Image: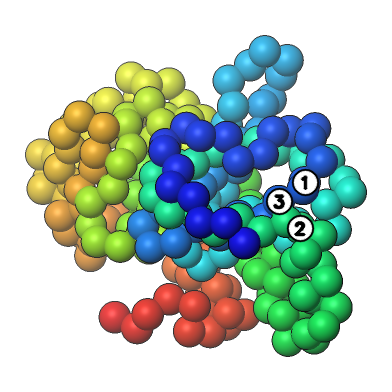
């Protein structure tokens, strides 16, 4: 297993490539899955992965191509292990197999809920959801993210995000500076968001109880 310090925008895996490695974000490091909706189009982010999970080789043995591209969203330390070595470890430990099966279920639940959220909820609600998801997966209330990156997560234009963040700043829910966000009032954001945040967190807690520290 290798320990690597990764920077924002570093590519972990590309769509179409065989999944040869599995990556574990540590501490405040975070990755995201991007799906390109058309040839040459801009990638839309559909899920984020922090210290609760892993990227690559979750359910396959690495012989299958990746459907999505995975990028480092928040820089930091990642652990990398060959997926083939991880598969051998799974064969030796039924508990390890069960934990990965549970996590894959949670990751799929996040993708399902995101698809439903994108179809039914407002940009403001979805913005609050992604900010809370990022805080949940990192340490502290401040994290690296540009408004353009947030627009990618939401699948909307930069101007929509700019207006939404301006409102959140005026309401003292968030603060921003170049390339960084800080959540000032998490409770207010939770009141603002849709029910998708609670649904995803509740599922994680039921399936992977204790994966996040208690408040």
Left or right side of 5 for 54: right
Do the CB atoms of the residues marked 2 and 1 lie less than 8 Å apart? yes
Q: CA distance from mark 2 to mark 1?
A: 7 Å
Residue at figure coordinates x 45%, y 43% from the top left: 6
Other residues around mark 2 within 10 Å, as few (<14) / some (14–19) / many (≥20): many
Spot occupied by residue 119 in the image (x, y as percentages of width and height): 58, 41
Q: Secondary structure at mark 3?
A: strand
Q: How many marks?
A: 3
Residue at figure coordinates x 65%, y 69% from the top left: 103
Spot occupied by residue 170 in the image (x, y as percentages of width and height): 10, 39
* Residue 125 visible (yes or no): no
Do the CB atoms of the residues marked 3 and 1 lie less than 8 Å apart? yes
Residue at figure coordinates x 43%, y 47% from the top left: 5
Residue where numbered disc 1 is placed? 19
What label does residue 44 carry, if any?
Answer: none
Do the CB atoms of the residues marked 3 and 2 lie less than 8 Å apart? yes
Viewer-proximal residue among 90 and 144:
90
Q: Residue furthest front?
A: 2
Other residues around mark 3 within 10 Å, as few (<14) / some (14–19) / many (≥20): some
Residue where numbered disc 2 is placed? 83
* Residue 91 visible (yes or no): yes
Q: Secondary structure at mark 1?
A: loop
Q: Residue furthest right?
A: 63
What label does residue 21 carry, if any?
Answer: 3
Q: Is residue 123 above or below residue 91?
A: above
Coloring basis for residues? rainbow
Quadrant where the C terminus is found in the figure: bottom left
Spot occupied by residue 45 in the image (x, y as percentages of width and height): 55, 38
Q: Secondary structure at mark 2?
A: helix
Q: Is residue 122 above or below residue 198?
A: above
């Amino acid at each position: 297993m290798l320990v690597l310090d990764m920077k924002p925008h570093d590519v972990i895996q590309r769509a179409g490539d065989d999944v040869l490695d599995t990556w574990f974000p540590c501490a405040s490091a975070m990755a995201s899955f991007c799906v390109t909706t058309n040839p040459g189009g801009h990638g839309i982010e559909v899920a984020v992965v922090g210290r609760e999970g892993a990227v690559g080789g979750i359910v396959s043995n690495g012989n299958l191509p990746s459907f999505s591209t995975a990028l480092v969203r928040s820089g930091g330390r990642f652990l990398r292990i060959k997926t083939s070595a991880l598969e051998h470890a799974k064969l030796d430990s039924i508990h390890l197999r069960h934990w990965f099966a549970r996590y894959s279920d949670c990751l799929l639940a996040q993708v399902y809920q995101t698809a439903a959220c994108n179809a039914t909820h407002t940009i403001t609600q979805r913005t609050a959801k992604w900010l809370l998801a990022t805080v949940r997966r990192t340490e502290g209330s401040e994290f690296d993210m540009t408004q353009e990156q947030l627009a990618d997560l939401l699948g909307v234009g930069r101007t929509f995000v700019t207006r939404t963040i301006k409102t959140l700043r005026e309401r003292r829910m968030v603060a921003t500076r170049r390339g960084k966000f800080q959540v000032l009032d998490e409770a207010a954001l939770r009141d603002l968001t849709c029910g998708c945040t609670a649904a995803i967190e509740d599922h994680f807690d039921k399936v992977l109880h204790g994966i996040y520290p208690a408040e």
